[in-house]
Amino acid sequence: MRFSFTEEQRQMRDALRSSLTESCPSGRVRAAWKTPDAALRIELAEQGILAINLPEDAGGLGLGAQDWVLLAEELGLVAAPVNLIETLATNPTLAAIGALDLASQVGTGAEFVALEEPGGFALDADKAAGILAVRDGRVGWLRDATLIAETSVDGTRRPFKVDGRFEAVDADATDLLDRAALVAAAELVGLSRRMLDLAVEYSKSRRQFGKPIGSFQAVQHHLVDALQRIAFAAPAVYRAAWSVDTNHPNRSVHVSMAKVYASEAALFTGRKALQVHGAIGYTFEYDLHMWMKRAWTLSSAWGDVRHHTDRVGQFVMSGGQDA
Amino acid sequence: MDLEFSDSEKRFRDEARAWLEANVPRTPLKSGDSREGFAEHVVWEKKLHAARWSVVSWPAKYGGRDASLVEWLIFEEEYYRSGAPIRVTQNGIFLLAPTIFEFGTEEQKERILPAMSSAERLWAQAWSEPEAGSDLASVRSHAERVDGGWKVYGQKTWTTRGAFCDGIYGLFRTDPNSERHKGLTYLLVDLNQPGVTVRPVERIDGDESFAEVFLDGAFVPDTNVLGGVNQGWKVAMSTTSSERGLSLRSPGRFMKAADRLVDLYQRRPDPGLRDRVTRAWMDAQLYRLYTFQTVTRMIEGGEIGADSSLNKIFWSEMDIRLTETALELLGPDAELLGGSPHAVDDGDWMLDFEFALAGPIYAGTNEVQRNIVAGRVLDLPR
């Protein structure tokens, strides 16, 4: 029993953190609301991140979820305007169906494979080399797809309602969707951490009644409650990464727990951060809303709290044991 | 990351499970917080000790098995899973003992620990006073220097199982000119002596396990000063962080409670409460994950620190949600106590709920825990 990341995994996280601190300030996120940030995918590809979970014969690093989960968290921390979920989720699927050429193109950032969320949308489907979807429990391509552009509350997201001729492939749908939910959960933890940081810093500098508002217990306890939810969501996410890598028989239950707690942590932290900021947090000019809106979208995407709680419930109520 | 248990950890679990299955009393003992039940529990504690299961993580020379922290958590899971009696020794073995291991002299370790692990001498904690609850540094009990030790005066209160235990540990002002955190000393006080009056106080669940302890010149030898004169605050803080952090409420307790709740749901299904039952199960699992993460950090050289406060907030509030859910499943039967003809599960859920309500109060109120996290983790201004 050893529940911690390796030194290498932490170093990869630290390296990405320092590069994103430089390259992806909030102004870049804001700019992506107006113009999609195509360069960011290339920058991530250059750091090997888009190919991290591709096999070596597709130009990848052959690493697993335990290696990318902290990186996804870092991208959430800066609210990076990039579709990492689709890529990390579909990479192993592309490898499994032998689409190695396409996979290696995704790894270099030259191509993008979209993934339709069941019952929802496919982001950037207009720029995709292909659209993967899950229909009736099977994975397949949507060929000759028609796209209807939608508008998201998060201006960096470009969702499309898609339909097309479904061409099934031989890949595991549950594992594919579990990976998507896990990336989302990791990003949500990162988003939460930054929203809490913003609120903590603000509470130390903003003065009312002659004191920093962060000295008032009512404010402190909002922030502590958010910290607690984040601190407890993180191990659920990290455990799910291990379970995915090891094909644990209960990996779907573990992914669902990760998504539930990460979604709730992000929604809760967003509300508390907004409350602590007061009216300034409610302005478009201040950064907080960009993080909140990403949290809103990712918490409902790839299975919301209700969906994933229900999936765990089916396991528990049918006598499932997980100790 | 390796979340599988090692072969030796699995063998440890198997051995613990087999012993518990063969030895846990078939019929539940009376409440360990009542006088009669306490005596039955001490008999059980002696049996645990005889098989060397009473303090698995301690060194063998004090009655333990030198088990790792992970093995200790495994033992706790198996202990609760088996339905074994509550540990009436817990405030000694889990809260006083870690402090003795850290601050005690060799003489103190050899004198106190074996008698603690064998349940020969049982210990109660005596932190609170009438005027010192959350504000522990305002203790008024004091000690006066006499030949060979100290005479102690004052009143301690809410001393759990104080009416049945042999000794208490707490803070006493040894420097009359000191204030607040300074000038306090951590003393171990024998309750079986002149100058000690213990008065039981009935709790809301009807048990007499609270006590007020009145001290009027009781003697404490120098050998019962733990960690040095006027060093008491530092020593006490080490106890309170182990209490909140790991040892007081191990995950096994809540995993068992969640399994019982799922079982109750299956007997009395109510689709409107299904998600809440599921959530209670998930919360117990989450607490387990968080604990294994903390234990790994400690094994790798880190400390619990103020994280233990987050821990305490989590389990205490989880326990209330869990037991509230059970009472909702029971509906009109929720109010029935044990012995009542239609009581479900012998009325245990109401008792569990009542006990859960104490969680956010004891071991430092959750408000104080939030203040600690705000100051030490988030670095917020005072």
Image: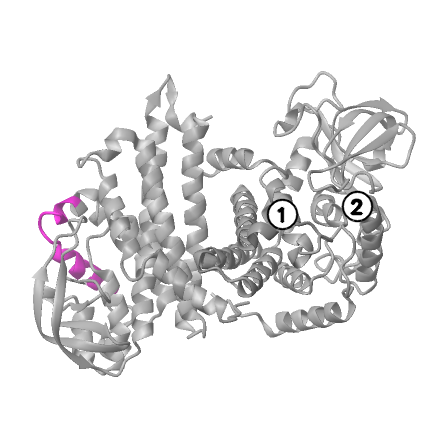
Tell me the magenta residue range: A30-49
Q: Which label number is shown at residue A170?
A: none
Please, what is the dominant secondary structure of the magenta stretch? helix
Number of other residues with Cα within 10 Å of mark 1, as a class: few under 14, some 14 to 19, many 20 or more = some
Is residue B315 visible in the rendered image? The answer is yes
Residue A291 horizontal/vertical position (percent): 26, 45
Instruction: Tell me, yes or no, whether the two marked residues, 1 and 2, touch with CB atoms within 8 Å.
Output: no
Residue B81 horizontal/vertical position (percent): 65, 64
Helix, strand or loop at label 2? It is loop
Residue B262 horizontal/vertical position (percent): 54, 62
In the picture of the structure, the residue carrying the numbered disc 1 is: B335
Q: Is residue A36 magenta?
A: yes
In this orientation, which residue lies closer to the viewer: B132 or A102?
Answer: B132
Residue type, label 1? Glu
In the rendered structure, the residue with mark 2 lies on which chain? Answer: B
Q: Are marks 1 and 2 on the same chain?
A: yes
In this orientation, which residue lies closer to the viewer: B102 or B20?
Answer: B20
Distance (Cα) linking label 1 and label 2: 21 Å
Q: As drawn, is A143 to the left or to the right of B88?
A: left
Question: Which residue does the image show at 23% across and 41% down from the upper left?
Answer: A289
Helix, strand or loop at label 1? It is helix
Question: Which residue does the image show at 47% across and 65% down from the upper left?
Answer: B1
Is residue A6 visible in the rendered image? The answer is no
Question: Which residue does the image show at 79% across and 45% down from the upper left?
Answer: B34
Residue type, label 2? Ser
Look at the picture and state if B133 lies above or below B118: above
Question: Which residue does the image show at 35% across and 41% down from the upper left?
Answer: A196
In the rendered structure, the residue with mark 1 lies on which chain? Answer: B
Look at the picture and state if B356 lies above or below B293: above
In the picture of the structure, the residue carrying the numbered disc 2 is: B34
Q: Is residue B175 magenta?
A: no
Look at the picture and state if B137 lies above or below B344: above
